[in-house]
Every structure is written in C-alpha cells, then in structure tokens.
Image (tube, coloured by chain):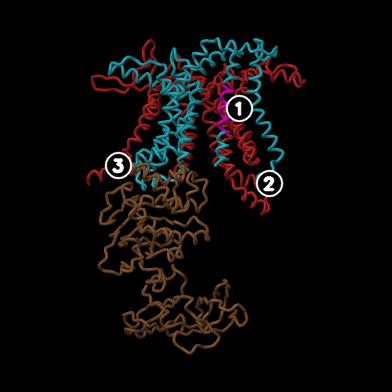
Chain colours: A brown, B cyan, C red
Amino acid sequence: MSEKGKPGSPEPWRDKSSKPYIRIEHLVKKFGEFTAVNDVSLSIYKGELFSLLGGSGCGKTTLLRMLAGLEIPTSGKIFIDDVDMATVPPYERPTNMMFQSYALFPHMTVEKNIAFGLKQDGIARSLIAERVSDILDLVQMKPYAKRKPHQLSGGQRQRVALARALVKRPKLLLLDEPLGALDKRLREQTQFELMNIQEKLGITFVVVTHDQEEAMTLSTRIGVMNAGQIVQIGTPQEIYEFPGTRMVANFIGSVNIFAGRVIEDEPDYVLLHSDEANADLYISHGIACAPGAEVWVAVRPEKIVASRTAPAETRNQLKGIIKEVAYMGNLSVYLVKLETGKIVKVTMPNQVRSSENRLTWDDHVYLSWLSTSGVVLHS
Amino acid sequence: MKRGLSLFVLICMILGFIFLYAPIIVLIIFSFNKSKLVTVWQEFSFDAYVNLVNNKQILDAVWVSLKVASLSATLAAILGTICGYVLTRFTKFRGRFLFLGLVSAPLVMPEVITGLAMLLMFIQLDGLLQNIFGIEPVGRGLVTLIIAHTTFATAYVAVVVQSRLAGFDRSLEEAAADLGARPFKVFFLITLPIIAPGIIAGWLLAFTLSLDDVVISDFTSGPGASTLPLVIFSKVRLGISPEINALATILILIVSVGIISANIIGRQREKKN
Amino acid sequence: MATAKQKNLVSFLQKIKPNGSSVTIFIPYFWLTLFFLLPFILIFFISLTQPVDFQQPPHTPIITSTENGLQLNLYFGNYQALTEDQIYILSIVNSVKIATISTLCCLLIGFPMAYGIARSPDRWRNTLLMMVILPFWTSFLIRVYAWIGILGKENGLLNGFLMWLGVIDQPLDILYSDLAVYIGIVYSYLPFMILPLYATLEKLDNTLLEAAADLGSKPTNTFFAITVPLTMPGIIAGCLLVFIPAVGEFVIPELLGDSSSPLIGQQVRSVFSYDWPMASTLAMMILLVLVVPIFIFQYLQNKQTVTK
C-alpha cells in the first residue's frame, strides 16, 4: 500500500523517471497590492507527507487554500494527477482539507459530520454507514459517534476533523496546522498517529505548519516558505544539516553564524577567515566561488564541543569565556563569549549525573568542531 | 460573582425594577376589580374578562393583528435574513453605505415620519397603478399594513441575524464546499441551520413589534383593518376601562409565559451542552 | 464539459466573492428603496406643494406638463409659515427639550441598573436581564396606559397614596402635564438604555478595574477614569436609541400629555388630517433636528459591522 515504504522508490523526488502527482507551476496569489504567494513551483509525489513550513503570513496557508480551491490563483497552474485544477471548484476537487479550526458542523453529530462529504457524492446509505464506521475505528472514535462537536475534547475534535477529511479518500489531503490547537503532550502523541494513518492509507498529505519540530517529525519532505516564496525544499535531514540560507538555518533549530571571507577554495575543502571570530574556519567541502567572496558559515550548537583543555585539532578552534549556563535536563546550553565579543551557543549532553567538574560560569573554554560540521551559506 | 455591589447600586436596582414593574402589577390587580372606576377597589370579579370575551370589536381586532403580525414577521424574517447576510458577507459593493442606511434607519426613525412617508407613498403608488396599468386601487387596509410592518421589522431582523452571522466561523462553509457541497447546499445545510436561532428570534421580535405598533398602523391602515393596538388606542383616549385592563393582563401573561419558558428552555439546552 | 465547469466556477465565485449585481442584494434593496427611501423623498417634495381641497391627492402636483415640457412646481410657503406661526417652532423646541431631559433621566436610572446587573452573581444575571427585557416585549401602549390610572387626579393611585401618607392634602396635577410625559418616556424607553449599556459593561474586563485599584485609584475615580470611557459606545448608543424616537413621540404625549401644548409628533398627526404639505414640512423639520443624531447612530452601526 504505502508508496513511501516501497523499497523501489523510497525517495521518488531523487528518481528522474518518477512522475510527480501534484504539480504547482509559477503560482501567484495577490490580495490587492499584497502578494501572498509569489511564483511558487513545486512537485509533490504520490504517498508523500509534504510540509509547508514558515512563519505567520509567509503564504503557506494561502498556498494550501489554492490547492483546495478556496482561493483562486492570480496566475499559475495546479495539476493534480495530471488534471488542471484551474476551473474546478472546491466541491469538485479530489482534495479534502482539515481546517485549522477543525470547522466541525456544530449542529451535526460526529457521525453526521463524517458522513456529510459522502452524502454529497450520492453514495448509497448502507455504504456510507460502512465507511463511516470504518473510519471511526481507524481514528478510535467509535464510542463518540453520536456526540456533537461541543461535547468532545480538543484531541477528539482533531480526530473527527481528520476522519471527515479522510473518509472521502481524496487524492490529496490538506492539513492546516493539524496539531496547532492541541497541547504539547497530546501533539507529540498525535504526530505519530497521523504518520501511522498516512502510511496505512497511502494518501498524499500536504501539511501547513509553523512548528519546525512537527514538520521535522512528520514529513517526507519540507518546503520552507518565506515572504510568499519557497526558499528551500528537502528532507528534514537535508534542511537541518544543509540549510541553504541563513534564514532557513535560523528558522529550523538554532545555529551559530560566522561571517567570513574565502581564502582558499578547492574542490574538497574551503578555508576562510572570520573577523567576527578572529579565526580561520575550515570546511571539508568545496563551494566553487572566488577567493575574497563574502560568505557565512553555519554551525549547529550541538556540533560544537567545549572543553577546558585545548583539543589536538587546531582548525576550527575558538577561545572564550562561559557567560551563561542553562541546565535543560537532557542537555545544557552554554553561551560563550569570544575574545571578539561574539556570543556562541553550545549545547552539550549531560552524560554523567554528577555536577562535579561540569563547565560553569566564567570558565575559560576552547570551542571546536569537525571540518564536516560547518555549512557555507551564500545568503 | 465579580465583585460585591455597593449599597447605592443595589438600591438603584431595586427602585428601578419597582419603577418598571409597579404599573404592570397595578394594571393586573385592577383587572379583577368589579368597579367601573378602575382605580377604586371594590370587589374581586371576572366581570372585565367576561365583557372582553363578548366584545366583538376587540376580538376582530385581535384576529386582524394576528394576521398582519404573522405575515409581516414572515416576510421580514426572509428579507431581514438576506439583509443581515448581505451586510456581513458582502463587505464591498457599490451602494453598501446606502444599503446599510436603509437597513438601519427604520430602527431609529420616529414612527410618525415613517408612517406619514409610507402612507403618502402608498397613495402615490395606488394612483400610479390606477393611471398607468388601470388596476383597481388597493386602498388602505391589510396589504398596506403588512407592507409597512414588514419594512420596519426587516431592520430588526437584520440586526439580530447580523449578530448571529458575525460570530459565524466561515471555515464551516468552506469545509462543506471542500467536502463536495455546492453553494446552494452549503447555504441550506450549514449556514441556515446555524443561524436559525437568530432568524427565529428575529421573527418573534418582528411579530411582537407588529402586534404592538400604533403609529405606523394608524397611518397605513384603513377601514376594516383595525389592529388591536388601534382599537385599544381609540378606547384609551377616552379614559381607562376595565376591559382594557383585562386584555392587558392576558397579553402580559402570554408574553411572560412565552419569554420565561423560552429562557428556561434555552438555559437548559445550554446546560445540557 | 469545460464550459459547464467554468459556469459552475463563475456561479461559485459569485456566491462567495459576490459582486454588486447579485440578486440576493437586489431583493431587499428594491423593497427598502421602494417602501422606505422613496417615501422620504416623496414627503420632501410634498412639503414643497400647496394644499388643495376636494382633490385626490389634496395638494398641487409636483410636476405638471406644459407646452414647454415638464415643469417642476416648487412652493416654499410651508417653510415660510413656520417662521410666521410660532406654534410649530415652539412644539419642536419643546419636543427636543422633553427628549433631552428624558434621555438624561434614562441614563441616570439606567446606568446603575445596567452596572448592577453586569456585576451581579452569574446565577442572578440572566434573570435580572430577562426582567429588563420582559416589559420591552409587552405592549408599549398598555404600559403607557397603565400610568393613566396611577397618575390621575381623581382616584389616581399615586395621589391617593401621597394623600394617605399625608405628604399632600390636595391631589397633584400630574396627569396631562409635561411631568407625566417625562415619566411615560423614561418608563417606556428605559430598556433601550439599559440593554446597550449592559452589553458594554458586561464586556468590561474586571482586571482593568483591579489594575486601577492596584495603582492607587479610588473607586469613584476608577469609575470616571476607566469605566465611563470604556462604556462610552454603550452610553452613546443608549442615548441615541432613547433620544431619537422620543423627539417624534406621539402615543405618550397623546395619552399622558397636556393637549393644549402638543408636541411635534402630535402636530404632524393632527395637521396631516387637513393639510398634507404642512404635515410633510413638519416631518422634514423633525428630520432636520435628528439628522445629526441619526448619522452618528448610522456611523456607529457601520463601524460595528465593519470591525466584525
């Protein structure tokens, strides 16, 4: 069933021969003077769980609503399974949406809410009952079938909204902040359930979220949006480890960024000097640009090691004083002030329980990281 | 409790409610008085009620009033729902400001002016219909009463429906469209059931206003179409009469029972939810 | 097929993103224009005609056709008559005075009541609110009528009560005076004042008052510095809802007032029976007085619907 699980094409986007299921071409949406979505092109493959990630007002919800047919694009095209969606109204599209507010009809029971979409298609009553019953089982809401939405908890409403959208077996399921209204604990639990259901049914999901953790956990791929444009598309790992821009690096996880100037650029390494850190930085991949070019190096805090003694490797080594320590339980966060005044964030796991010998305020430390840990950013 | 009420506020409230209710209570008590002089207590009796039931003029007027009120409330509920819908949903169209004015002006326009203006219009329209289409004049009567009542009641329905629609989650309609319902079905399966309580409340308000109206009816009604308030008004001008007290008592009783039970039902439903 | 779908799309777009041509707008627009807007334009024109006896309609035609085409006949004599005959102006002034004082009385009585209801315990609030609304739903006419029996000179309950108490030894002339009209207007319109006041007072965030108290403000100061400014929309709405209809009030002065000094609403009604143009002129004068309050009211209504 699951496309994603198929050994043949675990990552269809890497396979030149595989055909995208949803194609978005140069999509633009303007509201008066304001451009909400600015020339977005995107291919999504069958069985994917694709997340649109971005801050509020970045255009992700508008993009989702255009897929559902609730907004009419100013220009550009949307193809779902090779059918042009331009003139198809929402009630005829093979898509269903789970709304951020869930939009459960308050005057109908759970059962009736779920049956609503099937009724619109003129499906036989016995078949409707069967499919509603099946989907209630899937989302574990059978005992609540006769309740009305206001008699349900937030988590239960979320399940009903999901069931209502799934029951029509859409080619594409659109989810607008599906977990946004749930509290943190419930959110984590529901994330995995959502993934399970998606894998079980093999339906293609497009999820809009502002929560990077959620996007990282759920998605096969993430499209990071900013100011109406998609700035980077990739698997969660790609996005985290190889952010394309400073904006993406900052948005997903936390990061230390050093501005620098290229000294040597060879196919297998780059050496650059950062005035900010007053140090030479060495990255073990080439970037193909001229010496002297202005670039940035991004290093994740957990990739940096802080120690009181100088490490053997002299490259990528900085010196500083610990200014802040935050104990988080599983790890500790240190803010280290370099001699240049720049603050570097370092996180280190708390592997031993004892607090003896742990780094603390005003310790002089050496910071270092592997040559494979840094990423060069051009913008 | 948010905070204790000061003595001053408490006294104001008690006096205020006495002010609101004393006249009504006095009215009810004296409806059971035997004396012809309404305000001098003589003896308990149902004379006034017996006389009332035998008063054909009043009974006819009740019938006319009920007809006018139910018809105009229904028309006003339809028109007012559309107005409320247009005003909340269609935020930009040419003439919106004028439309808003037309919908809300009857709420505040002194009835004397509205009544006069409508009457003059009816006469003018009648003349036009007669001169141009050769239609028999409609004259003043039930039709003009219903049109007039519908017009001012529409405004009240619109306000009630509007406030109901203002709290309406638009994504419910979008969800229905997304699940395959055509616009027409969306309106009847989702929008209408959800705003129905507002429309019903609007209908009741329109019905009551029509049943209560004196001034506009006075202008726009004609012979043979005397509503209850018009009959009461003509009698009251001549002074107080026990029959009117009896009638008032019955009306107050009906309205009170209606409102209190509606309130209790509403609260119970709220509790159940 | 494609064209059918396109049609579907177009109709769907019209429903959710409608343009001005939509039929839904047209129906109520047409109705209200024909039976509300046009009548007002009509009274304006009729106020510019002369009365004619034994003719239907009993005034000179507004437009006549002559050899030179259609001709507009405007006559300003009615407005001139206003300045010559003081009685009309006096009744307008008197109406405005009575409406103003009644509105202030409503505010003075209504504010503490609305305040009290908004701050009473939850289990009481609904009942109290219902007690305010209940008289509003019972017949206006009957509630005014009730006062005749109370205020009457002979056998009036109030006079009887006061004389029994020994406060007075002669019955007071309250009925058929301005005082009775004040009582009638305040009594009838009080719910119109209380309801909008309650609506704003109920929404008033209690923590604001606590914050003011915490910052050292005394209750009286808090009331005037926080409560009153924040409930201003309710105060204005309540005052307009009382003042505007009170200016043109007809039933209350007719039943309770002094018939020798009729208010403007009564004038319109009585003049109408013999002189349509003059009645229309008086109606225009009421509108002139009320044009500013009505526009404020409309503005507030509009603001309310737009922000929603």
Q: Position of residue C84 (x, y in %)?
A: 48, 20
**Going from the N terminus, do you reach mark 2 or mark 3 first?**
3
Residue at image mark 2: C219
Query: Mark 1 = which residue?
Result: C187
The amino acid type found where label 3 is placed reads Ser
Q: Which residues are magenta?
A: B251-264
**Which chain is disc 2 placed on?**
C
Q: Are marks 2 and 3 on the same chain?
A: yes
Residue C157: image quadrant is top right
Residue C222: x and y in percent read: 65, 47
Q: Secondary structure at mark 3?
A: helix
Q: Quadrant of the N terminus of chain A?
A: bottom left
SS at mark 2?
A: helix
Up the image or down, B41 lies above or below A157; here it is above
Q: For the residue labelled by badge 1, is the local secondary structure a helix, a strand or a loop?
A: helix
B263 in magenta: yes
Which is closer to the viewer, label 3 or label 1? 3
Q: Do the residues bearing badges 3 and 1 touch, measured as CB atoms within 8 Å?
A: no
Q: Which chain's residue wears label 1?
A: C
Q: Secondary structure of the magenta portion, mostly?
A: helix
The chain carrying label 3 is: C
The picture quadrant where one finds residue B24 is top right
**Relative to C178, residue A191 above or below:** below
Q: Which residue is mark 3?
A: C11
Residue C185 part of the magenta segment: no
First along the sequence among labels 2 and 1: 1
Q: Outermost residue toward the bottom?
A: A312
